[in-house]
Image (cartoon, rainbow, N blue to C red):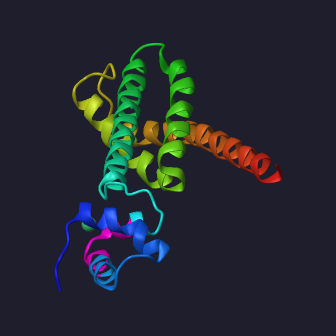
């Protein structure tokens, strides 16, 4: 049996669908459809989309997530640097924001991501002398625990807002 091209297949499709194609044309089209997903999609009335569209969208989403995570890390760095002076009060604002962003990005997994991230970042800023006078490792851990507690407030607020809006959406 003769194989046909995509163009030929598309030309013959309406004839096959209307049932007026010759037996040979019909067989050729059906054979091509079995081998060609693009023409099959067209035949079944779907708009053929490039198969990598989904892949590209996933990539963009992952990149956006990575970007947000980097912004969050800068926030942590900035917040910890501010603890040097009287900026500790700034941390009361920044840490909840970090907690909120953490929830937005990672949902419940943020509970396992933010504390280690804070601890590591705090050790780095402390070692670099960015947090003012150097702290003892125990002090770093202690302060990190306090920051985590403050960040948790933001996390819980974000989670509650999320659920509140979700409920509103459900009731619509
Ligand atoms: Zn084809």
Residue 38 in view of the camera: no
Left or right of 45, for residue 74: left
Give the answer, above or below, for where 112 lies relative to 64.
Answer: below
Q: Is residue 28 toward the left or the right of residue 150 in the image?
A: left
Q: Position of residue 140 (x, y in %)?
A: 37, 37
Give the percent coordinates (x, y) of residue 139.
Answer: 39, 37
Q: Magenta part of the protein: which range?
A: 31-41
Give the dominant element type of the magenta stretch: helix, strand or loop: helix
Is residue 145 found inside the magenta-colored segment of the image?
no
Q: What residue is shown at x 66% (from left), y 40% (from top)?
A: 157
Q: Is residue 147 visible?
A: yes
Up the image or down, 40 lies above or below 68; here it is: below
Q: Position of residue 8 (x, y in %)?
A: 25, 64
Residue in front for this viewpoint, 12 or 55? 12
Q: Position of residue 93 (x, y in %)?
A: 56, 24
Quarter-of-image position of residue 137 = top left
Most extreme residue toward the top is: 86
Q: Quadrant of ligand 1?
A: bottom left
Left or right, residue 3 beside residue 24: left
Badge count: 0
The residue drawn where x is 29% and y is 21% is: 130
Identify the residue shown where x is 64% and y is 44%. Answer: 156
The answer to if 37 sits in the magenta stretch is yes
The residue nearer to you, when weighing 34 against 119, is: 34
């Amino acid at each position: 049996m003769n194989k046909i091209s995509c163009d030929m297949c598309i030309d013959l499709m309406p004839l096959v669908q209307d049932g007026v194609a010759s037996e040979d044309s019909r067989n050729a089209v059906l054979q091509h459809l079995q081998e060609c997903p693009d023409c099959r999609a067209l035949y079944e009335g779907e708009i053929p989309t490039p198969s990598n569209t989904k892949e590209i969208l996933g990539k963009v989403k992952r990149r956006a997530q990575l970007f947000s995570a980097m912004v969050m890390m800068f926030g942590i760095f900035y917040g910890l640097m501010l603890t040097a002076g009287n900026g500790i009060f700034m941390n009361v604002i920044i840490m909840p924001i970090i907690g909120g962003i953490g929830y937005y990005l990672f949902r419940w997994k943020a509970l396992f991501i933010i504390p280690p991230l804070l601890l590591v970042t705090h050790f780095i800023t402390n070692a670099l002398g960015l947090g003012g006078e150097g702290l003892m490792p125990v002090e770093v851990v202690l302060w990190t625990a306090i920051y985590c507690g403050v960040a948790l407030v933001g996390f819980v607020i974000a989670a509650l807002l999320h659920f509140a809006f979700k409920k509103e959406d459900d009731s619509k």
